[in-house]
């Protein structure tokens, strides 16, 4: 997991532009996409993924079934600690399903089952002794459409700690979470107002603050920007880069440019003929978008299908 | 005329209706008449009752509300009915509300989709359609008999009556609570679970507060229904005719009782003309209670209809 | 929060046992509450059955086809009661069916939002009037002012007035279920009809109503069930306490299943629990329960058919 120095890498590290560059592929040629890094918020290269440190999350030959229908098959992925991993792929290929297996949200749907193992720090999350509630404290989730509770901003952020048994003063925790979600300055004077009174982008940041408040290790994001305008989207992406200092992020997105901009590692999922999703390729984001190994990957990222 | 004027004229003619839509007009008039019928009926009913009752209130005023039942019209009053209705208004929610809401919570949030669940759901729907008089039979056979067996006289007390009414409105409470819970968007549930909440935590901290206005509306509607019921209490032992009890709580709860609709029924059957007026006056008191409860329910519902 | 990378012994992902126990307790309480509703049904059926069997064992079956319903004289003619119930129901539906349906059509298809929000509550208020009040109204207003002006020879107590009273009570039920059915018809159907140049009346009669027909049928069936089960209006306005001969004359007094039950309960046999007259109360209750059960099951089936369609 050590990065070799090469000219492309140099270019990447020195680029500091903050405007997202979304470039469609030149006709017939290899696509050129600029990857933006806000390196000020980054840990030094080399410590972002320590040599020898195990990935915090792994899939091992995972297949997931809704009843008799297999939605994803034979998925093996490593999610690196404190990096942003994006899962991309055409509609219906099982990206969200895969994401939701991580925090066992699919348990809420009847007649689902999982084969294989989802490992969190080496422990299988689907072992019989594991309590899904505990899993969800350690692995948080931000949803596609911002869904703050019809409660005050303070109570929204405090909800997670409270149901997890934290009592007493959590003002500090609420403030820290809102700060880390880059929302504190905008709401510090109106913590008692309803969470629903905020704008779309603010609501999503509130949801991020809410998820952070339980002090998870991993944050799952299911197309978090798909209902936001470009400016709010940009704010969220900047926030994600800052968050990797403390949290591992897995994001599902159908917006390829977003994956290219914002992630370190990309997993490309495609739908097979039996309508099950499978991993076509998984690699560093630059590689996926500039020099993928698989022909299908190249076709997808250059927009030839999906 | 120029060519374009001719053309314009013919277009205009073809766009105008070829004949007046008489059938449509008649139909719309019919519709409005039907609506009017319903409204006018209500109006006439209320007006008739009010005018008939005026002499009673004019001559006796508050005395009517504080006198007890009597076979002599000039002394008869509804206080015992008011007391009975008030006690019922306290007991029925206490008995029906918790069981009803908990059942709705179970059915919507916990119950797996199996035969037991379907059995309960179908059963509740059927119970909602059972005539109220049949619930009176249940009350007589079970609650009154139970109290009698426990040594409480004939068993015909207001607690047995309230139990009967509670069982009567229970399906209504369950159905309205179920709908209120179902209306809470699933995104709220998802976020709650996603933060590590257990099922009961999500229900109690997120879903019930959101569904509370709808549940409350249902409860008020059910109460209004219960307070207007007569037939079940006739069977379950309300007293027709005069009686008297001591003033202690125990006397009130364990002894003979009546409620406003029962008084209306009793007086309506009496042949003396004076009792016609008294019946109307009692109806006014009853309507104040039930229509007030209905209005509260409708207001609650309109005010708290949340746009998700 | 301690982040154990790999716990030496015991996992941090195991839930607290205290929480697991309280969750199980909550679930048990909820199941208990739900089972209560089944207990109620069982209670109803058992008590009705037990006493009905007792009743039937005490009488001779020929008493069920006596010339009239005179329970204290041992005459338990069921046909008398069913005829009365049928007559009241027909009159009630004759009023509530058309009026309710037409009102629903207006509310659903013609009314502006403002009118609808003003008028719907009024109809709901009508639904909230206690039935005993309507019975009194039927006796003291409908009978003298409407029935006797048209039919001067009618009795003060007559089935026609009672039937009209039950009908008034039932109008809101017909109106609201029919209206729900019509509003469930998708707009696209109406728009298709208008797009072809049809007027509103045509669209309503030939497109919306046929599409909503199962809901309308459901409304009517549920209304019939309500009319059959209605007690107090007849008890007050139709007058035949203590007994009635078989009659189909709407201008005279009469007796229904339900009002007969009320009479039995308020008669002097109220106290004795074992006399056949008293037990007939439960037998009638059983018949009523079965009748309305069948009607409601059929009606609910139609309601579900409308919901499934769209």
Image: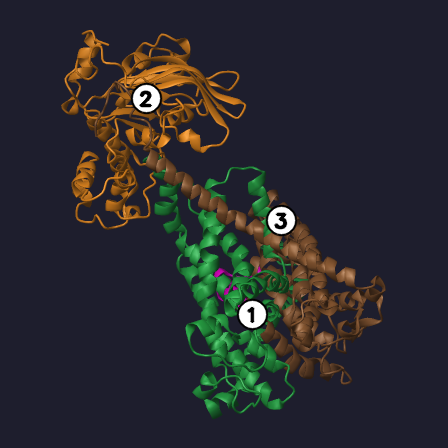
Chain colours: A orange, B green, C brown
Magenta-colored segment: predominant secondary structure: helix
Front residue of A68 and B205? B205
The chain under label 1 reads B
Q: Report the span colored magenta.
A: C110-123
Q: Position of residue A102 (x, y in %)?
A: 36, 25
Mark 3–mark 1 CB contact (< 8 Å): no
Q: Quadrant of residue C160?
A: bottom right
Between A167 and A63, the residue placed more toward the observer is: A167
Residue drawn 33% across and 39% down?
Answer: A146
Q: Position of residue A169 (x, y in %)?
A: 18, 44
Residue wearing tag 2: A86
Of marks 2 and 3, the one in the foreground:
2
Q: Are marks 1 and 2 on the same chain?
A: no
- Marks 3/1: CA–CA distance: 61 Å
Badge 2 element: strand
Report how far apart the C-alphas of labels 1 and 2 lie in the structure.
72 Å
Q: Is residue A16 visible?
A: yes
Q: Are discs 3 and 1 located on one and the same chain?
A: no
Q: Residue under mark 3: which chain is it in?
A: C
Q: Which mark is residue B156?
A: 1
**In this figure, which residue is indicated by the disc labeled 3?**
C193
Q: Quadrant of the N terminus of chain B?
A: bottom right
In magenta stretch: residue B302: no
Q: Is there one chain holding both mark 2 and mark 3?
A: no
Dots 2, 3 in contact, CB < 8 A: no
Rate crowding at label 2 as few (under 14), some (14 to 19) or many (20 or more) other CA atoms within 10 Å: many
Residue C164 appears anywhere in the view: no
Pair 3/1: label in front: 1
């Amino acid at each position: 997991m050590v990065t070799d120095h090469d000219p492309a890498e140099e270019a990447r590290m020195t680029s500091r532009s903050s405007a997202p560059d979304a470039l469609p592929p030149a006709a017939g040629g290899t696509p050129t996409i600029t990857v933006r890094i806000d390196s000020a918020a980054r840990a030094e290269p080399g410590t972002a993924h320590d040599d020898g440190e195990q990935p915090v999350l792994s899939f091992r030959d995972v297949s997931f079934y809704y009843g008799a229908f297999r939605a994803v098959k034979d998925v093996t992925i490593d999610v690196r600690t404190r990096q942003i991993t994006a899962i991309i792929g055409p509609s219906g290929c099982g990206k969200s399903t895969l994401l939701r297996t991580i925090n066992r949200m699919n348990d809420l749907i009847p007649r689902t089952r999982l084969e294989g193992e989802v490992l969190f720090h080496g422990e299988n999350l689907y072992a019989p002794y594991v309590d899904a509630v505990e899993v969800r404290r350690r692995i948080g989730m931000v949803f596609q459409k911002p869904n703050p509770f019809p409660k005050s901003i303070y109570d929204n952020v405090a909800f997670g700690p409270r149901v997890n048994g934290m009592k007493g003063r959590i003002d500090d925790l609420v403030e820290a979470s809102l700060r880390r979600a880059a929302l504190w300055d905008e709401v510090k004077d109106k913590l008692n107002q309803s969470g629903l009174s905020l704008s779309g982008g603010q609501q999503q940041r509130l949801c991020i603050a809410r998820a952070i408040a339980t002090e998870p290790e991993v944050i799952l994001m299911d197309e978090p920007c798909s209902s936001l305008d470009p400016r709010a989207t940009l704010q969220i992406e900047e926030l994600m880069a800052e968050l990797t200092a403390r949290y591992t992020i897995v994001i599902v997105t159908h917006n390829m440019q977003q994956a290219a901009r914002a992630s370190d590692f990309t997993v490309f999922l495609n739908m097979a003929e039996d309508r099950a999703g499978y991993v076509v390729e998984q690699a560093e984001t630059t590689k996926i978008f500039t020099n993928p190994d698989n022909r299908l990957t190249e076709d997808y990222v250059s927009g030839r299908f999906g | 005329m120029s060519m374009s004027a001719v053309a314009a004229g013919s277009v205009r003619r073809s766009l105008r209706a070829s004949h007046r839509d008489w059938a449509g007009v008649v139909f719309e008039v019919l519709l409005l008449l039907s609506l009017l019928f319903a409204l006018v009926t209500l109006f006439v009913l209320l007006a008739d009752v009010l005018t008939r009752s005026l002499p009673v209130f004019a001559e006796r005023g508050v005395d009517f509300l504080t006198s007890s039942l009597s076979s002599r019209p000039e002394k008869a009053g509804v206080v015992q009915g008011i007391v009975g209705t008030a006690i019922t208004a306290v007991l029925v929610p206490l008995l029906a509300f918790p069981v009803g809401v908990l059942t709705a919570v179970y059915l919507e949030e916990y119950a797996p989709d199996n035969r037991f669940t379907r059995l309960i759901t179908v059963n509740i729907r059927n119970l909602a359609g059972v005539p109220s008089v049949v619930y009176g039979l249940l009350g007589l056979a079970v609650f009154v008999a139970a109290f009698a067996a426990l040594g409480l006289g004939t068993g015909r007390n207001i607690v047995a009556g309230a139990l009967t009414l509670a069982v009567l409105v229970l399906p209504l409470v369950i159905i309205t609570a179920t709908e209120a819970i179902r209306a809470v968007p699933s995104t709220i549930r998802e976020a709650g679970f996603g933060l590590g909440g257990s099922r009961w935590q999500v229900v109690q901290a997120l879903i019930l507060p959101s569904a509370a206005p709808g549940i409350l509306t249902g409860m008020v509607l059910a109460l209004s229904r219960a307070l207007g019921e007569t037939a079940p209490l006739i069977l379950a032992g309300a007293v027709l005719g005069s009686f008297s009890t001591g003033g202690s709580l125990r006397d009130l709860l364990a002894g003979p009782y009546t409620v406003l609709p029962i008084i209306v029924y009793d007086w309506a059957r009496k042949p003396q003309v004076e009792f016609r007026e008294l019946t109307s006056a009692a109806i006014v008191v009853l309507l104040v209670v039930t229509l007030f409860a209905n209005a509260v329910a409708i207001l609650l519902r309109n005010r708290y209809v949340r746009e998700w | 929060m301690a982040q154990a990378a790999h716990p030496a012994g015991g996992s941090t992902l195991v839930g607290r046992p205290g929480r697991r126990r309280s969750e199980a307790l909550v679930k048990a309480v909820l199941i208990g509450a739900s089972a209560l509703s089944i207990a109620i049904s069982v209670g109803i059926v058992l008590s009705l059955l037990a006493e009905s069997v007792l009743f039937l064992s005490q009488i001779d079956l020929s008493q069920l086809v006596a010339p009239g319903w005179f329970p204290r004289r041992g005459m338990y003619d069921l046909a008398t009661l069913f005829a009365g119930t049928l007559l009241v129901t027909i009159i009630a539906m004759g009023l509530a069916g058309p009026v309710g349906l037409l009102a629903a059509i207006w509310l659903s298809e013609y009314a502006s939002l403002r009118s609808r929000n003003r008028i719907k509550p009024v109809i709901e208020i009508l639904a909230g009037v206690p039935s005993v009040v309507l019975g009194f109204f039927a006796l003291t207003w409908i009978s003298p002012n409407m029935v006797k002006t048209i039919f001067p020879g009618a009795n003060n107590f007559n089935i026609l007035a009672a039937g009209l009273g039950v009908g008034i009570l039932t109008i809101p039920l017909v109106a609201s279920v029919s209206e729900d059915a019509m509003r469930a018809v998708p707009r696209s159907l109406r728009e298709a009809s208008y797009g072809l140049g049809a007027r509103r009346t045509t669209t309503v009669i030939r497109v919306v109503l046929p599409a909503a027909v199962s809901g309308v049928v459901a409304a009517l069936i549920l209304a019939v069930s309500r009319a059959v089960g209605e007690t107090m209006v007849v008890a007050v306005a139709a007058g035949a306490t203590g007994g009635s001969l078989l009659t189909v004359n709407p201008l005279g007094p009469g007796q229904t299943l339900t009002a007969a039950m009320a009479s039995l309960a308020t008669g002097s046999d109220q106290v004795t629990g074992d006399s056949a007259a008293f037990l007939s109360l439960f037998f009638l209750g059983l018949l009523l329960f079965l009748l309305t059960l069948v009607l409601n099951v059929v009606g609910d089936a139609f309601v579900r058919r409308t919901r499934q369609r769209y």
